[in-house]
C-alpha cells in the first residue's frame, strides 16, 4: 500500500466481500488534515489486524507509512 508516494511494502488485503483495506481507508475521505488521515489509517489497520486479515507488523507498517508520507489537502 502506498501513501504520498511511499510504499509500505504491504500488499492490500481483501475481505471475502471484495473490500480492500485501502477501500476502507478511502471510505473515510475527505480528510481535513494529515492527522485525521493518519488516525483513520491506524484505526482501519487495527480493525483488520483484530479480524486476523493483516499481521500486526504489516498493520504497523501501513500506519507508519501514512504517518511519514507527504500530505496535500
Image (spheres, rainbow, N blue to C red):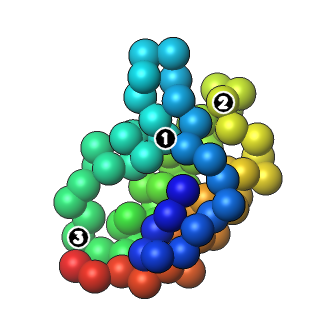
- Mark-to-mark CA distance, 1 and 2: 9 Å
> Mark 2 or 3 closer to N-term?
3
Q: Residue sitting at 38 percent across and 64 percent down?
A: 37
| Residue that appears at 50% across and 64% down | 2
Please say if 2 is above or below 45.
below
Which mark, residue 21? 1
Nearer to me, 27 or 35 = 27
**Res. 32 mark:** 3
Q: Looking at the picture, how far across and down is residue 33, in whole percent?
A: 30, 75
Question: Considering depth in this image, is 8 or 63 the residue closer to the camera?
Answer: 8
Q: Earlier in the sequence, mark 1 or mark 2?
A: 1
Q: Secondary structure at mark 3?
A: loop
Contact (CB < 8 A) between labels 1 and 2?
A: yes
Q: Which residue bears the numbered disc 2?
A: 53
- Of circles 3 and 1, the one toward us is 1
- Identify the secondary structure beneath mark 2: loop
Q: In front here: 25 or 46?
A: 25
Amino acid at each position: 500500500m502506498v501513501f504520498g508516494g511511499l510504499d509500505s511494502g504491504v500488499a492490500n488485503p481483501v475481505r471475502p466481500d471484495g473490500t480492500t483495506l485501502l477501500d476502507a481507508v478511502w471510505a473515510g475521505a475527505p480528510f481535513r488534515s494529515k492527522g485525521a488521515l493518519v488516525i483513520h489509517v491506524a484505526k482501519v489497520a487495527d480493525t483488520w489486524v483484530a479480524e486476523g486479515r493483516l499481521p500486526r507488523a504489516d498493520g504497523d507498517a501501513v500506519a507508519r507509512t501514512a504517518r511519514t508520507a507527504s500530505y496535500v489537502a
